[in-house]
Image: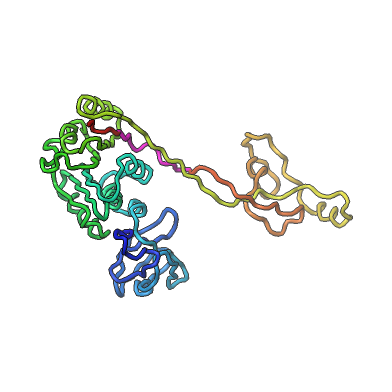
Amino acid sequence: MLPLQDGEVRKGDRLIQDGDLVIVYETYRQMKAVTVTKNGEFQNRYGLFMHNDWIGKPFGCKVTGKKGGFVHLLGPSPQLWTLVLTHRTQILYIMDISFVLAYLEVRPGCVVMESGTGSGSLTTALARAAAPTGHVYTFDFHEQRAEAARKDFERTGLSSFVTVTVRDIQGEGFPEEFANEVDAVFLDLPQPWLAIPSVAKSLKADSPVCSFSPCMEQVRRTCEALSTTDFRDLRTFEVLLRAYEVHEEYFGTDLGFDSSNNDSESAVLSESPPPHKRLCSGDSKVIDSGKSQLSAKDNLMEKGPKKGRRRGEQLPGCVVARPEAEAKGHTGYLTFARRAV
């Protein structure tokens, strides 16, 4: 992960070594976590890459494979790890994680408790925010998931900042040893209202708690439990993300011509096929113009530069932005409250 001590070298200035975890960036939507090993290999659609060629290069560098393809080697961070980790359960993504970290006021030195370790996406961000002097205690009732999470924290170098325990928080509550010792609590449980009394005992005065629930009925019952316990300042949020694609686009050619040109241009125009008939916007009929068939949309806007045109010049491209076709929808509701003094 990112440097945890003030004296550590920044990952952008440190060279990749044998045993390091790197994020292999292939495309915007395709990344993989790879542990570098001497004489190891990594193969994808861009070619074969030898780990020996990676050792000694800085994080963030571009490396070329045997077939000429390339990838970028990025240093691991909580944000990137969220995108490449193995999904054992539904996870929280960056938009919710950043919101949780801000409202729980997690900072170096904090003691944080989490119920519902799952895939460890949020746990990784909590540990990184609380390090180097803080600690995260996370609980999960599923023993296999807890063991897999421990291995992930060892792989990312966060095992000294995270303690994973198998415990049913809904039925047993948080351990008594944490009474009035915790700076923040996060709950990701099917019935979080059952754990609220235990949360009130564990939190320090004026410390926050957050509950993540996918259904409004869960939110209602959790808020009822919070309001009847020692909590105030109840707030519920839904965080939505709208990403945009930015790229250059071409809008066909200019079909107009200068009447002052000589007869040679008229000859060129006479040799060209007649222009397609323009349709009203919204008309989806297809026009038959000899060898090709173009829809109304193709008539009004042709994408990409066309070579060999003899009627007008290619119009310059422009940068356009449009929402991504597959937008992330509702993930859940975040309910926050503070323990009363």
Say if residue 204 shows up in the picture.
Answer: yes
- Return the residue nearer the eye: 274 or 217: 217
Q: Which residues are magenta?
A: 325-335
For image coordinates 42% across by 60% down, the residue present is 26
Dominant secondary structure (helix, strand or loop) of the stretch shown in magenta: loop
Which quadrant holds residue 337?
Answer: top left
- Residue 160 within the magenta-colored segment of the rendering: no
The image shows residue 91, relative to residue 58, as above or below, that is above
Q: Quadrant of residue 174?
A: top left
Image coordinates of residue 112 in percent, x first then y, are 23, 45
Q: In the picture shown, does residue 212 fall above or below 74?
A: above
Q: Is residue 158 above or below residue 36?
A: above
Q: Quadrant of the N terminus?
A: bottom left
The answer to whether any part of residue 87 appears in the image is no
Q: In this image, 6 relative to 257: left or right?
A: left
Question: Quadrant location of the C terminus?
Answer: top left
Place of residue 69 in the rendered image (x, y in percent of width and height, measured from the top left): 46, 67
Which of the two residues, 112 or 220, is positioned nearer the viewer here? Answer: 112
Q: Is residue 42 left or right of residue 27?
A: left
Residue 35 in picture, x, y percent from top left: 30, 65
Q: How is the image coloured?
A: rainbow
Count of numbered tags: 0
Q: Position of residue 275 (x, y in %)?
A: 75, 46
Foreground of the two, 109 or 69? 109
For the residue pair 55 and 207, the one nearer the viewer reads as: 207
